[in-house]
Image (spheres, rainbow, N blue to C red):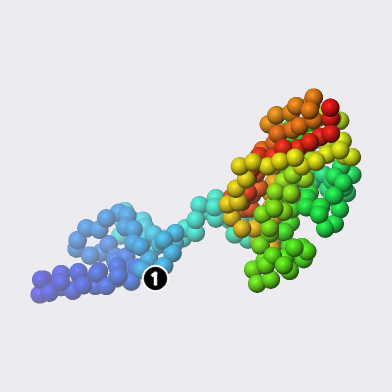
């Protein structure tokens, strides 16, 4: 009888643990003071249930903790923020009207929408919002709209113009030309809906000859899509 009762007790305990319930400490065998059981119903590795037995007398209690990830655990409000409010807009250091005061380009060839970082005569970071309404998409290509690589190069050159068309550099809006490109590479296609982020940095300036050498890189989502070296004729000399 004793053996049968003990066997029944073990079977009852095993069944309880399988369903995520801890047995009572009134059984005639020892239980650990802490038990951790993975939730078999969860398909998310970040979601687990932990059961803790709190008793030093003969009473037991069940405590369940759910972990939904470090960000949610540290800041519960994080999961409540709508996606449209999570990502701030790019800063505006120079808007389109200020850009038009510096660059001579106009529609449909003005390919810079906003400057987000600016160090006159040294470097600039600007963006071009690529939309399906851009006039080159109907022909490039009708079934798969991709921004032409030559226009990415032109957009970078225009950012270079914003850097160089400054009194400190000696640039002249009337005499500023794209003089050459070298080591240009296109890494990924740019499509409608992308935001092209372009950085142009002055590497070398020969004021006597009015020639500036610049390095340019264009990004989408933090990945380089186009890069190269540029020569600008500033009209000096």
- Local packing at callout 1 (Cα closer than 10 Å; few below 14, some 14-19, many 20+) is few
Q: Is residue 216 left or right of residue 67?
A: right
In the rendered image, the quadrant that contains the N terminus is: bottom left
Query: Which quadrant, please, contains the C terminus?
Result: top right
236 relative to 3 in the view: left or right: right
Taking the spot 70% from the left edge, 34% from the top edge, the residue there is: 213
Query: Where residue 93 sits in the image (x, y, percent)?
Result: 80, 43
* Visible residue check, residue 141: yes
Residue at the outermost top position: 208
The reply, left or right, for residue 56 in relation to residue 27 is right
- Is 120 or 203 nearer to us in this picture? 203
Q: Nearer the viewer, residue 148 or 122?
A: 148
The quadrant where residue 57 appears: bottom left
Q: Residue at x 70, y 29 (%)?
A: 204
> Circle 1 sits in a helix, a strand or a loop, which is it?
loop
Where does residue 61 sit, x and y in percent of width and height? Answer: 38, 62
Of residues 144 and 180, the one nearer the viewer is 180
Percent coordinates x, y for residue 212 in the rendering: 74, 33
Q: Is residue 98 in sight in this rendering?
A: no
Quarter location, residue 144: bottom right
**Does 236 sit above or below residue 185?**
above
Total labels drawn: 1
Q: As displayed, is residue 205 above or below residue 106?
A: above
Query: What's the residue at 63%, 49% (across, down)?
Result: 226
Circle 1 residue: 41
Query: Residue 75 location in percent, x, y?
Result: 58, 52
Out of 31 and 132, give the one closest to the viewer: 132
Q: Residue at x 19, y 63 (%)?
A: 28
């Amino acid at each position: 009888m004793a053996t049968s009762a003990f066997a029944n007790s073990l079977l009852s305990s095993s069944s309880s643990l399988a369903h995520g319930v801890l047995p009572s400490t009134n059984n005639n065998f020892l239980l650990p003071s802490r038990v951790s059981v993975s939730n078999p119903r969860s398909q998310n590795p970040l979601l687990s249930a932990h059961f803790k037995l709190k008793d030093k007398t003969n009473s037991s209690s069940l405590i369940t903790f759910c972990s939904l990830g470090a960000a949610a655990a540290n800041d519960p409000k994080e999961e409540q923020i709508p996606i449209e409010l999570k990502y701030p807009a790019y800063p505006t250091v120079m808007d389109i009207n200020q850009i038009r005061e510096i660059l001579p380009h106009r529609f449909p060839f003005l390919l810079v929408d906003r400057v987000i970082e600016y160090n006159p005569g040294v470097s600039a970071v600007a963006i071009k919002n690529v939309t399906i309404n851009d006039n080159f998409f109907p022909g490039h290509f009708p079934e798969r709209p991709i921004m032409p690589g030559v226009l990415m190069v032109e957009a970078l050159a225009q950012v270079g113009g914003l850097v160089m068309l400054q009194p400190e550099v000696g640039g002249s809006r009337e005499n500023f030309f794209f003089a050459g490109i070298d080591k240009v590479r296109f890494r990924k296609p740019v499509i409608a809906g992308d935001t092209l982020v372009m950085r142009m940095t002055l590497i070398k300036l020969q004021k006597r000859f009015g020639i500036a050498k610049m390095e340019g890189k264009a990004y989408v989502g933090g990945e380089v899509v186009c890069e190269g070296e540029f020569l600008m004729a500033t009209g000096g000399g």
